[in-house]
Image: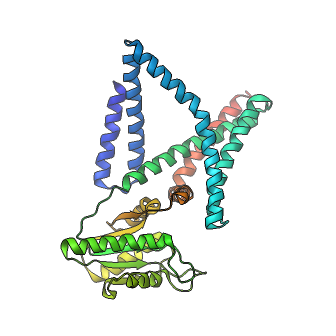
Amino acid sequence: MYFAVIAAIFLMVFVGLYVWDRRRISNGIFLTIGLFFVLLTILYVVLTVSDRHDVVRVIVTGLAIILILLIPFFFFGLIFGLIMNGRTMMKKEGKRLANLLPMFAGLGLLGLFIWGIAQGSFISSPPLAAIFAAIIMILTYFIFFFVTFLISSFVYQYNFPRYNQDFIIVLGSGLIGDKVPPLLASRLDKAISFYTKQLLKTGKQATIIVSGGQGENELTSEANAMRLYLLEKGIPEDYILMEDQSVNTLQNMRFSKAKMDAILPKYKSIFTTNNFHLFRAGLYAKKAGLKSQGIGSKTAFYYMPSALMREFIAIVMMHKKLNLVIVGLILLMFLGLFLISFL
């Protein structure tokens, strides 16, 4: 049972790293590989049993055939879903490039499928075949990375900080003029909920740090708009602290840390953001030297595909040197194979 041993090793490494620091993309890598070998172990056990039991063999064979037949439906369903989600995003959120990411992804997959069919049917060009194979290999790598990111993000959601916090950082996400939009309101409501529960359970009042500067199309700073929102919800002004200089998540964390350091030498803090942004915000908190963990607010379902794609692209850019090296090695490998074919 080599698969089981390998699965156990990867899962134990994941548990150790997760306990040490859950804000690591490597946690998701070890968990993804561990789960893959768990599936292989289950498959091996089922196939071994099916060699001795005709009924089990028939059931396993039937399920395998059904799954294989469902692959085309899943693939084209994914393409259709992504394109329709892009259409929904355009209607509800506007025709910004970020909102079109699901549509671009769906059209890209459709284009690759058509290219693959054409390549196998009537296009007989070795250079095009090599380029197609290289694209598929690079796409496979990024799909694995994306799955790893999704698993890391999902696992990080299960964070239950203790009700002993000194500070709650609320990360800004843009305004509509001088008004707090629903996305940002959900972050503030999450902070209010934690603040209230901590006060009821322990009697301790946390200071809420509203973090965000003023954008080009905004009539006031995000921090000030958030402060007014909290005041309307009944949070005492003495327990609201503004950080209104930051323009990105890393600065949110760094500038908020400076505010907290100036008030208390030792403190406990958490941050709130939307669930899709939680994992990347945790990475930035670590980069800023904060021990803070995050709690996520819910996001509208239709918004999630685009949001997760943006988060993934941001994670890729955080590790751009490593990703460029891997993509470069893949291209060099296919270039070498292409040159060898002419020798």
What x and y, as percent, mark residue 6?
35, 32
Q: Quadrant of the N terminus?
A: top left
- On screen, residue 126 versus residue 217, left or right, reads right
Residue at horizontal 42 percent and vertical 54 percent from the top: 153
The residue sitting at 32% across, 43% down in the picture is 13
Q: Residue at x 69, y 48 (%)?
A: 107
Q: Is residue 251 above or below residue 323?
A: below
Q: Residue at x 70, y 33 (%)?
A: 338
Residue 25: tell me if it is visible: no
Q: Is residue 145 above or below residue 246?
A: above
State which quarter of the image contains the C terminus: top right
Residue 39: x and y, percent? 41, 32
The x and y percentages for residue 204 are: 21, 77
Coloring scheme of the render? rainbow
Report the side of 141 relative to 54 (left or right): right
Residue reaching furthest to the left: 202
Visible in this render: residue 11?
A: yes
Q: Nearer the viewer, residue 300 or 119?
A: 300
Q: Quadrant of residue 331?
A: top right
Q: Position of residue 322 (x, y in %)?
A: 52, 51
Residue 33 lies in what quarter of the image?
A: top left
The answer to whether residue 264 is above or below residue 93 is below
What is the tally of numbered marks visible in this picture?
0
Is 302 on the left or on the right of 187, as rendered?
A: right
